[in-house]
Amino acid sequence: MEEKNMKTCDCAEKGIDNCKEIAETELRRKLDLLLRTGSILMESAADTSRIMRTMKRAAAFLGLDERYMHLYINWNVLMVNYSDEAHSFSKFQRCEKHGINLTSISMVSKLTWTAIKDNYSLEQYEQALNDIKATPRSFTPWQVAIGGGFACGGFCIQFGCDWPAFFFCSLAAILGFRLRMFLPTKGCNNYVAIGISAFVATLIAWLTSFLSLNPSIAAALPGFMHSDTPWHPLMACALFIVPGVPLINFVSDMLDGYIEVGMVRALNTLLMIFAMAFGIAFAIQVCHIDNFVKDLTMTPHHEYWEFAIAAAVSAMGFSTIFSIPRRLLPVVAVGGIIAVCFRNFVNLGPSNGNIGLDMGLSIGSLAGSALISVIVIKARHWFHTPHQCITIPSVIPMVPGVLMYRALFAFIDMHGVVGEVTVGMNNLIKASLAIICIALGVAIPNVFFRRFIADNRKRRLLNMLVERKKKNGEFVDLHEVEIK
């Protein structure tokens, strides 16, 4: 009561009689800041559980009582309602441009904690949000294209290619990826751009195969440019398109109960994969390449140090696509090495001429992602970044892009031969199980350590809020807001 009287006196001293209107204006501003916080996360490809947690933390900073607050999160629209038995205020925020920006996710997460700890004003918080929104991506378009291209080369090594084929695959992927980024800037539809870039990348990879398959060309080239696996680049050159982050977020959202958002992510992912498969299949038809996708083996026979190099290259390459903070590149390189090498050790074995436990792709994918996810529970405190910003780039090199492509290509290229559907379904099931296992491994902190992590987080947040309330008072009181 004393606090309300003080506020009334402050208004009276300033000659202001409409304190309730001022309170309403401030409340709407706070709701707007809350929605802007959530929209940055959604547009940066944060999973829904993280968006919800961060928005609730932002609401605590803004002085919005969780008992009166109702959040609705969708792919394109966020909504917040703040109401009691006599008042109701709602605001909406559209999410226009969806991409992947792990730097923005990290900055927003840090902002919500810092704002509470340092007792930010609304002006400071709003300015910080504006700064995050205006922060350029961590890498230039050509750096992203080169990083993504070498990431595809790393995939190619994991499929069993030699090092000359690694560079041929990387070259095709770099040029295809740069085209993929260029076309939307000229107004091209996103899915059409994906199809065209997949077509061009596959066409370039096919042309590089002549360097090894054509005797006259091969004889004129130095030995280090000759590849014994000239067809492998065709399998990996377009994997920069495979939407690994949306796939993992889709499974994570479904596990956390956010079914609607998860299904939208899944549908968007499926459309991207269809566009990629169409571009690759069209290139294969134009080039009259037959049956390589079904018969070409993907079983690697490299040393583990080669797997490690390929994994580090892929993890750092995809990190450039995800706009990860530059300081974390060595971290995700180590994470990729741990995840992929452990996956290969569990997956491969004597049955395919390798060292390992021979337990299959699904179990191997679960083991690799689970190991790195558990390690990052502790490592995220060392590097002051959210769990997702290290784990996702580390496990992306394990996404079975070729299996997904093989499944779709099997259905697209059917000729009525007995067993074609079986081949397609076999690849589809294997790919789906691997993706689910990767997502389960990433979600282990939420699934098994949720209570422990949540209790620590709530305890820390509560202590910080107690200090803040000593300075700023209690939550927003709806009774101070005018009823219209």
Image (cartoon, grey):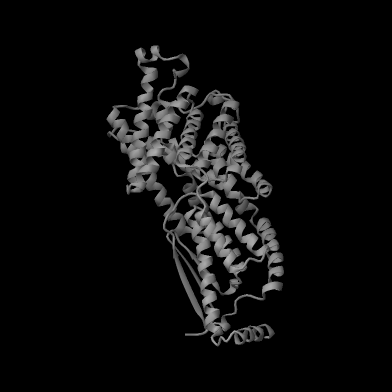
Q: Whole-percent x and y of residue 223?
A: 46, 14
Q: Whole-percent x and y of residue 368?
A: 59, 39
Let me know if residue 216 appears in the view.
Answer: yes
Q: Is residue 461 left or right of residue 225?
A: right
Foreground residue among 49 and 136: 136
What residue sits 43% from the left and 32% below the top?
A: 236
Residue 188, placed above or below residue 426: below
What residue sits 49% from the left and 60% below the top?
A: 39
- State the image quarter where residue 276 is shown: top left
What residue sits 48% from the left and 49% below the top?
A: 100
Q: In this view, does 201 lie to the left or right of 162?
A: left
- State the image quarter where residue 305 is shown: top right
Foreground residue among 468 and 209: 468
- State the image quarter where residue 413 is shown: top left
Let me know if residue 256 appears in the view.
Answer: no
Residue 123, placed above or below residue 259: below
Q: Whole-percent x and y of residue 446?
A: 60, 53
Considering the image in quadrants, where does the N terminus appear?
bottom right
Number of disc labels: 0
- Residue at the limit of the structure toward the front, as seen here: 14
Q: Whole-percent x and y of residue 92?
A: 45, 68
Q: Is residue 481 left or right of residue 294?
A: right
Q: Is residue 379 left or right of residue 434?
A: right
